[in-house]
Image: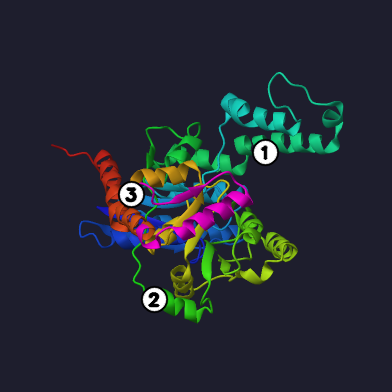
Amino acid sequence: MKIGYLHLGPFEHGINRYGRLLAAESQQRSSLDVLEAEIVLTDNPIYNQEVLIKAAQRLSDSDLVHIQFSYFNDRLWGSGWDQLVHLRVFLNACPCPIVATLHDVYYVPTGVKGILKYMVPQLFSAFGIKTFGSDPSPEEASSISTLRKAVRVVKSWWIHNFGAATATLRELTKHAHLILVCSQEEAQRLDSHVDPKKLKIIPHFVETRSLSTTPVEARNSLNLVKKRVITILGFIFRPKGYQLVVEALPYLPDDIQVVFAGNADADREFVDFLHKLAQEKGVDHRIRVTGYLSEIELESYLLATDLAICAFIAFSASGSISTWISVGCPILAFDLPQISEYNLIEPDAIQVFKPYTPIALAAAIQEFLKRDRETLSIKVARLGQKLSLPNIIDRHLTLYTSINQHSHPNPN
């Protein structure tokens, strides 16, 4: 069987890397031939059309083509309505069956279900209505800020239903033979967008790492000796819990060092806010923001970390969690459905905290530091074995084969 992989976006982009690792593992299978096409789109529409058509032509001999797709397509398929144009160009030029993995699945229900499940509760909240039987005060009902909140809710619902991201998803699901997501939670978010017969769940893989140093050496090289290190990994985005960690730090012992290990350029305004907040709390000297890390630098911070913090208030699937699992680092996360899914695979592999408050997080960190780290690491390592890249590729291959057999039925 011949599999084509399209890699969109810059080399360092996490979704680009996700697809490249799938392709690399597929190349290890003697039963597969792998074709790859890698492109970065620009602001030039003529250039973009040319490279998309060339990529489709390069992959056209495949039995199927696997592509990656995101709600946040700006650096992949393009921003705004350009993403729909680019997707159509590729699909029209590619004659092969399409498999698409969806990342950053933040779509909300559409139609009447969306109004009842998404817009109505948020409108009630905007106007201060707690139940269907309560009424807002005159001050609440007439306030400009309340009306602005209501307008934002309606605008958000309209964008989710009729905006570029949803229209592009609709185009993709119409043409794709199979849509893959990494969790049951993501599948539920797509229940009004994707035909259930096309939708399959394959967990995010955990890659195997060949470590070139030790935790002691990593701490020495990073000047983190005699520190207990807690780290948030990846691009700095607001929903990942950075503010919560800063607010929890004053409740933690002085030897705890916080590391924000990842690119800080995506939301510079938020990074500046975090610096100011840390100064106000008197903990700025206990926080290190690394910026973008090379693979070698990343490895050092992974090994120097005592506890990985994954304090998402909401998320889709997380490459950073998979990275932590790959080195067997204990993980503390907010109690969300996706975390429960991990713990169904390997019980108690990921520690959780709730409610979503600084004091609750600080208490959970303190409690963790009393536990046996080796025992927790063993559970994380077992989870990593179950989600290893070879095992996850096996699950992909089962689906690839079913599509291939359907597209090329046995004449006998």
Image point (63%, 54%), residue name: 244
| Region rendered in magenta | 347-375
- Find residue 189 and name its label: none
3D distance between C-alphas at marks 1 and 3: 35 Å
Dot 2 falls on a residue whose secondary structure is loop
Residue receiving disc 1: 156
Q: Is mark 1 in CB contact (under 8 Å) with mark 3?
A: no
| Circle 3 crowding by C-alpha within 10 Å: few under 14, some 14–19, many from 20 | many
255 displayed left or right of 279: left
Q: Is residue 15 above or below residue 298?
A: above
Q: Which residue is mark 2?
A: 214
Element class at badge 3:
strand
On whether residue 363 falls in the magenta region, the answer is yes
- Distance from Cα at disc 1 to Cα at disc 2: 48 Å
The tag earlier along the polypeptide, 1 or 3, is: 3
Where is residue 249? Give x, y as percent: 63, 60
Give the residue drawn at x 43%, y 32%. Answer: 195
Classify 183 as above or below 17: above
Name the disc covering residue 64, or none.
3
Mark 2 residue type: Thr
Q: As rendered, which of 409 and 12 lies closer to the eye?
A: 12
Give me the residue at 36% from left, 43% from top. 344
Image marks 1 and 2: residues in contact by CB distance under 8 Å: no
> Please, what is the three-letter code of the amino acid marked with disc 1?
Ser
Question: Between marks 3 and 2, how big is the CA–CA gap?
Answer: 42 Å
Type of amino acid under label 3: Leu
Q: Is residue 64 visible?
A: yes
User: Disc 1 or 2, which lies upstream in sequence?
Assistant: 1
